[in-house]
């Protein structure tokens, strides 16, 4: 695995890990409040399956630069992703959880990214349900002052994720925290992204305005235990996106800070293998 920093058109440095070798590059984007470590296990698995994989920290998250002007709107996030795609310099398949998925969708629909093999949206719709987003926002807002210990952070995640099994180790959680100068553990992201991102309504309108121009296969991986996607929102996407499908991932909820996205991994893998084969058949000279 190689760690890289890609400088975007706005001058920010985006941190990423690259592993594996292959003709197709899979780019993994995480959700708001997460870091690239949320995709750690899937990245390694895909690399073993013959893909080159890039998992990156969104601006203001993990080891990527924070935006000096506090710009965490979708167009800025999409331009950052475009820099990663340019660096990859190969056919790409995009996978995005929550905010990372919406950034990829907007990048494709707006033309900021000219092409991709496919896009997997992990438990996110263009107009998320109010109750689901409110629950996530409450969790993120509740812990801005940090935690005394990593174990305290684990308790907070477990409370959000009630009813689901805890991970056997808190090592993964530790990678999503950093110790501040006051000795408290804080999530590895800029709190301003909660304040300066688009509103749910504005974001939904922006995404719907470009939906018909997303000319790649899009699959929504809907968490069976998630509150983010309503039937109405899915129907709207199906009517607007040219090549759209849905798969329900049983037992999976919406992922937040400190959580891995592993429950969605089998569905992501199946979609990638399906779409990369399909594109290869349509474009035999690409490989």
Image (spheres, rainbow, N blue to C red):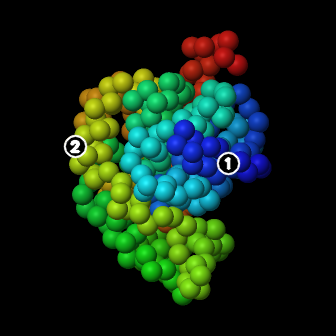
Q: Is residue 252 left or right of residue 54?
A: left
Residue at the image point whose x is 62% and y is 26% from the top: 91
Q: Earlier in the sequence, mark 2 or mark 1?
A: 1
Residue at the image point whose x is 67% and y is 42% from the top: 53
Instruction: Please provide percent x and percent y for residue 225.
Output: 38, 59
The residue wearing badge 2 is 232
Q: Is residue 284 left or right of residue 151?
A: right
Instruction: Please provide percent x and percent y for residue 157.
Output: 47, 74
Residue at the image point whose x is 30% and y is 60% from the top: 132
10 Å crowding of disc 1: few (<14), some (14-19), many (20+): some
Q: Is residue 45 left or right of residue 83?
A: right
Q: Quadrant of residue 135?
A: bottom left
10 Å crowding of disc 2: few (<14), some (14-19), many (20+): few
The residue wearing badge 1 is 5
Label 2 SS: helix
**Is the residue 283 above or below the residue 226 in the image?**
above
Instruction: Pick the residue in front: 153 or 89.
Output: 89
Instruction: Pick the residue in front: 145 or 216.
Output: 145
Q: Quadrant of residue 173?
A: bottom right
Instruction: Please provide percent x and percent y for residue 247.
Output: 42, 42
Label 1 SS: strand
Foreground mark, 2 or 1?
1
């Amino acid at each position: 695995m190689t760690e890289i920093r890609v400088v975007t058109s706005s001058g920010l440095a985006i941190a990423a890990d690259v592993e594996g070798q292959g003709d197709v590059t899979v780019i993994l984007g995480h959700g708001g409040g997460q870091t690239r470590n949320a995709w750690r296990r899937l990245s390694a698995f895909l690399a073993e399956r013959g893909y080159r994989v890039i998992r990156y920290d969104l601006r203001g998250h993990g080891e990527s630069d924070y935006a000096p002007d506090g710009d965490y709107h979708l167009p800025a996030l999409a331009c950052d992703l475009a820099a990663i795609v340019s660096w990859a310099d190969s056919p790409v398949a995009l996978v995005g959880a929550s905010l990372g998925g919406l950034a990829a969708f907007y990048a494709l629909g707006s033309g900021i990214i000219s092409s991709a093999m496919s896009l997997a949206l992990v438990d996110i719709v263009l107009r998320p349900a109010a109750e689901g987003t409110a629950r996530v926002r409450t969790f993120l807002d509740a812990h801005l002052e940090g935690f005394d210990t990593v174990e305290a952070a684990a308790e907070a995640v477990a409370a959000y994720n009630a009813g689901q099994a805890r991970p056997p180790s808190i090592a993964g959680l530790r990678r999503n925290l950093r110790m501040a100068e006051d000795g408290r553990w804080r999530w590895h992201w800029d709190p301003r992204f909660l304040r300066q991102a688009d509103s749910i309504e504005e974001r939904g309108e922006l995404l719907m305005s470009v939906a018909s121009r997303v000319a790649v296969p899009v699959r929504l991986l809907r968490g069976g235990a998630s509150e983010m996607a309503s039937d109405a929102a899915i129907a709207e996407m199906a009517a607007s996106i040219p090549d759209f499908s849905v798969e329900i991932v049983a037992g999976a909820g919406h992922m937040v800070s400190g959580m891995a996205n592993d429950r969605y991994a089998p569905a992501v893998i199946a979609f990638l293998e399906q779409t990369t084969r399909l594109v290869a058949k349509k474009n035999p000279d690409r490989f």
